Image: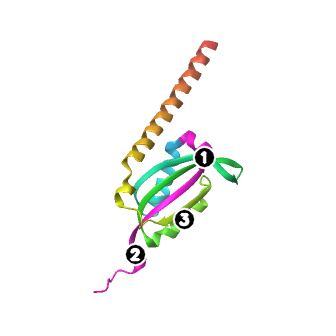
Amino acid sequence: MASTTPAIDRVCPYEGMFLFPQSAAADLAATVQHVRDILQRGEAEVISLVKWDERRLAYDIKGNKRGLYLLAYFRAPTKNLARIERDCNLSELILRSMVLRADHVLPEHMLNPEGNQRLLDEIALRGQQAMDEEDSRGAGDAERE
């Protein structure tokens, strides 16, 4: 029996790679939230979102020699993929992005609970370091008075 749902209304798994300037790692929580917001506007269900790597770029992109890569697995209606890609292209924070169908990736690989936990741990660590730096700056100001 033929399906009555048009192909464009299907929800499919996708893999998205998002490249940010290395400076985005300083506020990793905001960077991750930016990707989540883009996916949410496209009615995507995020399966996992992990920091893939920070590395030197093969060539300068908008004056950046190094970049931060985030890898996301998500499910979204096929009709909304163009909106997600458009939002990525219009983002002033994202240097490059690529979204591919992820039919080839097993569901247990998409979940990646270890990667998700590492990302949360790094966000917490960077937040703690920022607070410690702020406290040490505040202590230095108090000594000068």
Q: Amino acid at mark 1?
A: Arg
Q: Position of residue 84 (x, y in %)?
A: 51, 64
Q: Amino acid at mark 2?
A: Asp
Q: Amino acid at mark 3?
A: Glu
Q: Quadrant of residue 43?
A: bottom left
- Name the residue carrying label 3: 85
Q: Position of residue 22 (x, y in %)?
A: 61, 44
Magenta range: 1-27
Q: What secondary structure is found at the residue carrying circle 2?
A: helix
Please report the residue visible at 44 percent of the width from the left and 52 percent of the height from the top: 49
Q: Is residue 9 magenta?
A: yes
Whole-number angstrom distance, CA of label 2 to CA of label 3: 17 Å
Q: What secondary structure is found at the residue carrying circle 1?
A: strand
Mark before the other along the chain sequence, 2 or 1: 2
Q: What secondary structure is found at the residue carrying circle 3?
A: helix
Q: Position of residue 129 (x, y in %)?
A: 51, 30
Please report the residue visible at 42 percent of the width from the left and 46 percent of the height from the top: 115
Mark before the other along the chain sequence, 2 or 3: 2
- Name the residue carrying label 1: 55
Q: Is residue 90 magenta?
A: no
Against 137, residue 34 (above or below) is below
Colouring mode (rainbow / by chain / secondary structure / one colour): rainbow
Mark 2 residue crowding within 10 angstroms, few (<14) / some (14–19) / many (20+): few
Q: Residue furthest bottom?
A: 1
Please report the residue visible at 50 percent of the width from the left and 66 percent of the height from the top: 100
